Amino acid sequence: MSSGKCDTPASAAQYAHDYIVDSPLVGNVLEHAGEYDAKTDPEETTSLAAHVINAMTIGVNTFVYNAVDGGRDIMDLEEDLSVLAAALVLHDTNKYVREAYGVETDGNTSEAFDAYFENGDDFGVEAFLGDGYRDDLHYLVQRTEVNEDSRETRGTGTETGFASLARYCRIGDQVASVILRNGIEQGYVELRKKLDDGEVHFLELSQVEQPILNDELLGATKEVISGEDDGEEYGVVVGSTSDRVLYLGDEVDRDVLRGRVYKRVKQNITRNGPYSFSCKLGWNTFDYDVLGELSLPVDEKIEQIRQQAVELLKSDAGGIEPLERVPDGFDEYLPSLIKAIYVDRVSEFKNERLQKTYDETYESIEGSKSAKGQKIKLEFITELAISYPDISDELDQLQQKYEPLLEGDLEASVDAIAEGVSSLFGIRRGEAVPNKYRMCYLCGKQTETLYQKGQNAIYRPYEFSKRVPPHEEYKKICEVCNLEYALLADTCERSGVKLNANVGVAYYYFDEFLGDIRLRGGRVGLQQGETIDLSDTEVDKTLLRPQYYVQPFNFGDHPAMGEKNHRMVIVRQLLQAAQDAGMKIVLGRPFTRFESADEVFVDEDAIRQQELLGLDAVDRFGPLPSFIERGDDHEQSHLRRALSLCKIISMVGQNAGMRNPYLQLDQDTFHHLADFAVQNHEHATRLSELESYLETYHTKQLMDMKTVAERGVALFGEQYDSKYKKTKIFREAIDAFLSAKNQQMSDADLLEHVAAQVYDAADREDYAGYVTVEEAEAFVDALQAYLLENDLASLKKLSDWENALVNSYLYAYEQVLYEDDDAESSGN
């Protein structure tokens, strides 16, 4: 890229983006830091990768703006640019080494830096920057945070030629942190403190209800501000939310901006983007659909109808004999024929030859009058194709009559893109609240357009809607929602998602605020198809520019599992993808407005099984650090825990040959998990994943049951032969508890009764050894404490959970035996 093309702040910022992104630096940050949290406050949840990238982007864009606006050439500053980007990537080195390597340091000390580089330089900083910059980077990193101890790099011991970059390191980290904590508005205030007030601008917009369209509108707005539409540029975008843009540069006239955004959105959606729009054309139906509401050149719309008609003639739709090829030249008449036969339903022609062909075709069709009326449409056009070119004169006459009428139909009476842009800029039509029968069933806007999408639709025309009278068939849809439908339908088609099979939508996003880094293309992807490979969730870590990423998928029945279990499998994939890319997820239904969340993962339509297992919402990427004080009742909800639980369920289910393993576990507690595993896995007590999970997340329950097991061993001896012997004394105790509760004994009598029954049962067995009353009482006391602690002491709950308690005791008993054996082996 020549320097002449980088002589403005926006073009220089684009150059800087390309320069940085062409390296593996950003991808490495996503890959290695995506699974860790940036902050400890639950309301500031974002991944370390997201915070690092946001800080780097804000710092780099601010540096570039000031440098180029001050007359410097960006390509003379490549070394500064590289050092600044690398320093901001490393500005939370202490947090990264604590999470990745367990190295605790008091800030970004030399120890933290040494731990990072000695463990392999995961972000590839030196591959990006080259050798010899460690001291410079350490100097800048220690001056990034206000409270950082910088004594190690102060004075004559450390010299750097990049001291001026410290300002931009502080801007990047501080503004990113303020936005994360207090929102983009406070980020604007903070940035104005650090730069000239007149250079910092905050553009307030109105988020539209339609999420895919909103993403396109916002992206186009940022492109116009940066001058990427070949118009005048206003400045350098710092970042954005779904309805705000923060940028450096000149004040923008909203009306001028709105006009340019409209042109850019139209260009992006209809020409530059991935979308393909079509009419609804079948063997017996036709509707202009979104083509009638987009302000596209009419000749492009006619060409779309022509192409679809050609494909229809080559298919076997409606059981009609397909054509191997459409005669050359005949396809030019198809749009006019579609208008005449499908739209105007013409059955009488002034031309005798056309009339004769129509009548003969109609008579040749078997079936009722209604069936004939449906099939004649495509049959007649097929007959005309077979007779072509002998009837070209007749077709010329028909085309001359109906093509102008078709063009009139295709002139958009309401421009859906213009309506969306107006909504984005807060311009609302002054109309009264419409009658509910004239409301768009998705957004509530007034409309007369019938929703006629047919059987192969995300929402079917005749399905329930509060805004449709009970005896009417069709809902109504406004032009903007119809455009959103077309955008989503095309996205589904490109993702291999069937529209008529219970479509769900996952919104992936780094955080509510996204620093304006324009990365390479690709969307977050889930494996679609007949089988789901749980071990290989594909995620594109080089992400593009949208505020959020829309990933549709099917929630319906899967050939190998039921619908609910299939949903849980998809949730597991989503959680894995979120961890891999360092992004957050909101899971919802199509056409629901995107709203960011404090949590890493939120399912807005969770099923009961998710709620019971804690998989309906996940608070953080990872557990809180050890130095954060938390109560004993603190629930550690994070991706690492959720994915570990999913892995255990999958392992146990696979071992047992279960079709629906996610539906077999009732709750995430010690005795539920132990029971599930012991019942269904022959080596459950030796599963390291289960042992680690229980020790980490159900520590108290596990230790309490281990206490019961240890006292059982002391009372009954070590049993290695069978499950029956290992659990005999425990089952005797549960039976005694049930008997005593049935008799409604007092607490004192109950404990005495159970202890006596346990003592008698143990004393009768030769292999129990010498039994004492004290050992029996200690065993019963521990068991009662466990039951009370876990709300299982009532007659009903104890009866319901008897078998599960036996299995959880077996798990704890075998853990005690293994520990004793390991201790004995170590002693020998």
Image (tube, grey):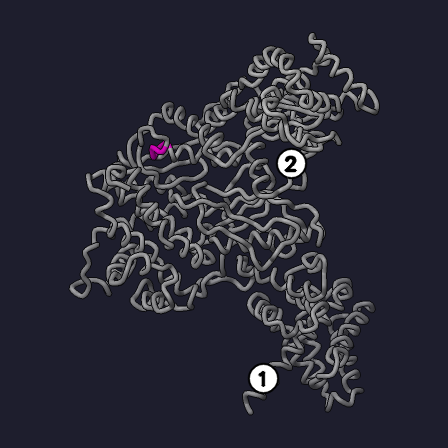
Farthest left residue in view: 156
Q: Kindly tell me whether residue 774 is visible in this rendering.
A: no
**Percent of width and height locating residue 579:** 50, 55
**Percent of width and height locating residue 550:** 53, 42
Would you name the residue on which mark 2 appears? 458
**Percent of width and height locating residue 58:** 33, 45
* Rendered position, 508 above or below 685: above
Give residue 765's quadrant in the image: bottom right
Say whether disc 2 or disc 1 marks the residue closer to the N-terminus.
Answer: 2
* Rendered position, 61 above or below 153: above
Q: Is residue 318 magenta?
A: no
Would you name the residue on which mark 1 appears? 822
Which amino acid type corresponds to the residue marked 2 in the rendered image? Answer: Ile
Helix, strand or loop at disc 2? loop
Tell me the magenta residue range. 224-228
Q: Counting other residues with Cα less than 10 Å from the Cα at mark 2, is it few (<14), some (14-19), or many (20 or more)?
A: many
Residue beneath the point at 56% across and 24% down: 291
Q: Majority secondary structure of the magenta segment?
A: loop
Q: Nearer the viewer, residue 599 or 14?
A: 14
Q: In the rendered view of the protein, which quadrant contains the C terminus?
A: bottom right
